[in-house]
Image: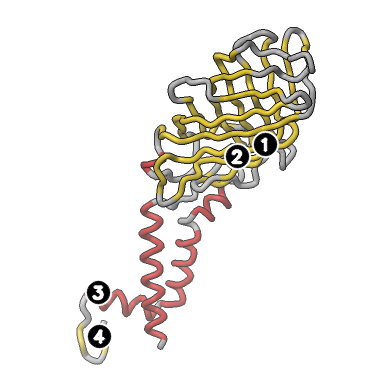
C-alpha cells in the first residue's frame, strides 16, 4: 500500500488499514469487547446449572476456638460471632485471580436475633425467626478490595440440633427472593433462583438445649460453613487475555478517531 508515493512500514500499514476499514473494525471490536467481559458471562451463564444448586464457597474456623456465642435475653435470643477463618471459593464461573484461588485467611463476623420461641420435636431442638447479617473480609486486600462474601438473611433462618447434644446447625435459603442476599467484591449472582448457607457448630458448651423460657440457652461453639446458589456465581474479574483484547480494541478505536480529524 502506498500513500503519497511512500512505502509504508508494517506498523503504518496496519494503522492505515484500520483507518480505511474503520466502520467494520469498530463493529468487530465492540463485539469483541462485549463478549470478553463479565457482561457476556452474565448473559450466557444465566442458564448454566439452572437445575442445580452448587456450593460456591466454604470456610474453616482457625484454631477451633469457641468464638460463636448464643445469648438468651429472656424474651429473645441473640447469636453473634467474630473469628479468623480460612475461606475458599469453588465452582465459580469465569476467571479467578491467583490470590483468590485456594484458601486464604479472613475474618468472619455474624449477628442474628430472634423473638420466636423454640420447640422440641422427636428429641430435636428447633428455633426459627432469626434475621441478621454476616461478612467475610479478607485479611489481605486483593486489588484494593476485601469483601470476599457478605450477606443478609431474614426471618426464616433456623437453629436445629439434638436436645442436649454438643453440636448444632444454623441455616437459611431462598426461594423467597429477599430471604438470603449475597454480595461480594469479586463475584456476582445473576438472577439467582436459590441462595443458601449452612453453618455447622461443634463443641457446643453447655449442651444445646432450651432454657425455661423456651429460648435456646446460652452456649459457645466453634464452627464451619458452606454457601451455595443456583446458578453458581460468576467472577467479576476479566481474564488477562480479555484485558489485552480490550486494550487492543481501545487502541484501534483511538487510531480511527484520530484519522477522522
Query: Considering depth in this image, is 97 or 76 the residue closer to the camera?
Result: 76
Give the image location of residue 120, x and y in percent. Answer: 77, 12
Residue 92, above or below 214: below
Query: Distance from label 4 to label 3 (Cα)?
Result: 13 Å
Which residue carries the number 3 mark?
A: 11
Which residue carries the number 4 mark?
A: 2
Query: Considering depth in this image, is 35 or 104 the residue closer to the camera?
Result: 104
**Category of crowding for the residue at label 2, using alpha-carbon neighbours closer than 10 angstroms: few (below 14), some (14–19), many (at least 20):** many
Which residue carries the number 2 mark?
A: 231
The image's mark for residue 38 is: none
Residue under the image location 50 percent in, 53 percent down? 38
Residue 172, above or below 139: above
**Quadrant where the C terminus lies?**
bottom left
Is 16 placed left or right of 55 in the picture?
left
Chain-order first, disc 2 or disc 3:
3
Query: Distance from label 4 to label 2 (Cα)?
Result: 55 Å
Chain-order first, disc 4 or disc 3:
4
Amino acid at each position: 500500500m502506498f500513500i503519497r508515493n511512500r512505502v509504508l512500514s508494517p506498523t503504518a500499514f496496519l494503522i492505515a488499514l484500520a483507518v480505511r476499514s474503520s466502520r467494520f473494525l469498530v463493529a468487530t471490536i465492540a463485539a469483541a469487547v462485549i463478549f470478553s467481559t463479565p457482561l457476556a458471562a452474565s448473559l450466557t451463564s444465566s442458564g448454566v446449572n439452572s437445575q442445580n444448586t452448587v456450593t460456591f464457597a466454604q470456610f474453616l474456623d482457625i484454631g477451633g476456638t469457641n468464638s460463636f456465642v448464643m445469648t438468651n435475653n429472656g424474651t429473645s435470643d441473640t447469636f453473634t460471632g467474630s473469628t479468623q477463618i480460612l475461606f475458599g471459593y469453588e465452582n465459580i464461573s469465569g476467571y479467578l485471580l491467583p490470590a483468590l484461588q485456594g484458601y486464604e485467611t479472613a475474618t468472619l463476623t455474624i449477628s442474628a436475633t430472634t423473638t420466636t420461641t423454640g420447640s422440641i420435636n422427636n428429641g430435636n431442638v428447633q428455633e426459627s425467626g432469626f434475621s441478621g447479617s454476616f461478612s467475610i473480609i479478607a485479611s489481605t486486600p486483593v486489588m484494593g478490595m476485601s469483601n470476599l462474601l457478605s450477606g443478609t438473611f431474614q426471618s426464616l433462618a433456623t437453629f436445629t440440633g439434638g436436645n442436649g447434644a454438643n453440636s448444632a446447625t444454623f441455616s437459611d435459603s431462598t426461594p423467597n427472593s429477599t430471604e438470603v442476599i449475597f454480595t461480594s467484591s469479586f463475584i456476582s449472582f445473576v438472577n439467582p433462583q436459590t441462595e443458601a448457607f449452612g453453618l455447622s457448630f461443634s463443641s457446643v458448651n453447655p449442651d444445646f438445649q432450651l432454657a425455661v423460657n423456651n429460648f435456646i440457652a446460652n452456649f459457645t461453639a466453634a464452627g464451619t460453613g458452606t454457601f451455595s446458589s443456583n446458578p453458581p456465581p460468576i467472577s467479576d474479574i476479566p481474564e488477562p487475555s480479555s484485558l489485552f483484547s480490550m486494550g487492543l480494541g481501545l487502541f484501534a478505536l483511538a487510531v480511527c478517531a484520530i484519522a477522522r480529524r
